[in-house]
Image: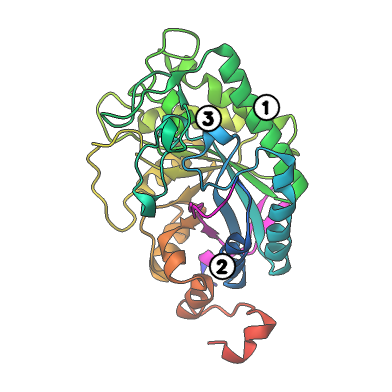
Amino acid sequence: MAKLFEPLQIKSVELKNRIVVSPMCEYSSVDGFSNDWHLVHLGSRAVGGAGLIITEATAVSPEGRITPDDLGIWKDEHIEGLKRIVTFIKSQGSIAGIQLAHAGRKASHSSPWKGGKMLWLEEGGWNTVAPSPIPFREGERPATTLDKSGIEKVVADFRDSAKRALQAGFKVVEVHAAHGYLLHEFLSPLSNQREDNYGGSFENRIRIVLEVVDAINEVWPKDLPFFMRISASDWTDGGWTLEESIQLTRILQTKGVDLIDCSSGGNIPHAKITVGPGYQVHFAEAIKKETGILTGAVGIITTPEQAEEIVASGKADVVIIARQFLRDPYFPLHAAHSLGVDVEWPVQYQRAKL
């Protein structure tokens, strides 16, 4: 049997295969609420046979949204709609996960098809927060530097959102500490120029991440999986490095984090990244080799054969796929056929089984 379709046990949860739907922003919410788009988008990937489906970056606070159109979980009223989605995903034999996020200095932008530009206050934008008042792009409004009480609020927002996620029925929680969003901003010296206990040394720069993990552990059951997405490298001199990612991972292991979702970049606009099929897989391979933790590989993974090679060779434990799932919601069913594996199809689709 292809390794890609072997089950994976993580604590009390079993994934039926190693194919994961990556968090992908849909920019289709009003006031953070999920709606029919999210149900159909995420639900169709469950029909398509993915083992784990992770929601898009879900904001832990209104000011933590990338855009006014982001999905949210900052208030109890968001739970009901998310629970409907989780229930459907479960009915198809898939596991529902949620990515908790805060955009930091990259917040208060318009959605991509609305221009993707920073929104000024008179355009419906809001004041952003960050470790240091360094704009992401030249000409953008500097963020407000978080003080201790602001940091405490961020940590509490992650904790409270994880509690709501549990109430909605999610079985996997992932913390977004990648792509230049708030937690990554603290990790990287390129965006963190603080001189207090949250800046400077490696130990100080990772402090808020560890506080978020500890806070979530207060409400998230110890038998349910806990993931973290990181940018394993800033791809720029003086930035966050793979070596620091490995060092951070070793600490996260002691706090019950089960899997590192290994992405990269996003913290500065001018990073020089050579993009190609599987261009980030080596990060997952290195972190897994050095720490023994479960890892997820991302980055232009588009074919069944490529996905199979990644997991079969031990470079990562799961493949976390984004754009290919937008092209083909039924990628796992088609991959199984290509790799000669007989998997269950939804009963409604049996007459079309390949």
> Could you tell which of marks 3 and 1 lies nearer the N-terminus?
1
Nearer to us of marks 3 and 1 is 1
**Mark 2 against mark 1, which lies toward the viewer?**
1
Q: Are marks 2 and 1 in contact (CB under 8 Å)?
A: no
User: Label 1: few (<14), some or many (≥20) within 10 Å?
Assistant: some
**Quick check: 99 left or right of 334?**
right
The image shows residue 55 at horizontal and vertical percentages of 58, 52
Secondary structure type for disc 2: helix
Q: Nearer the viewer, residue 74 or 42?
A: 74
Q: Quadrant of the N terminus?
A: bottom right
The magenta segment: 4-30
Relative to residue 294, is residue 321 depicted above or below? below
Label for residue 250? 3
Q: Which residue is at the front of the view, 111 or 199?
A: 111
Residue farthest to the top, as pictured: 196
- Mark 3 residue type: Arg
Question: x and y percent of residue 108 in the render?
Answer: 44, 36
Q: What element carries label 1?
A: helix
Q: Name the residue under label 2.
A: 5
Q: Check the image and report above or below for 342 versus 211.
A: below
Quarter of the rendering containing residue 323:
bottom left
Q: Residue at x 35, y 58 (%)?
A: 300
The answer to which of marks 2 and 1 sits earlier in the sequence is 2
The residue labelled by disc 1 is 215
Q: Which amino acid does label 2 sit on?
A: Phe
Mark 2 or mark 3: name the one nearer the start of the chain.
2
- The reply to whether residue 327 is visible in this rendering is yes
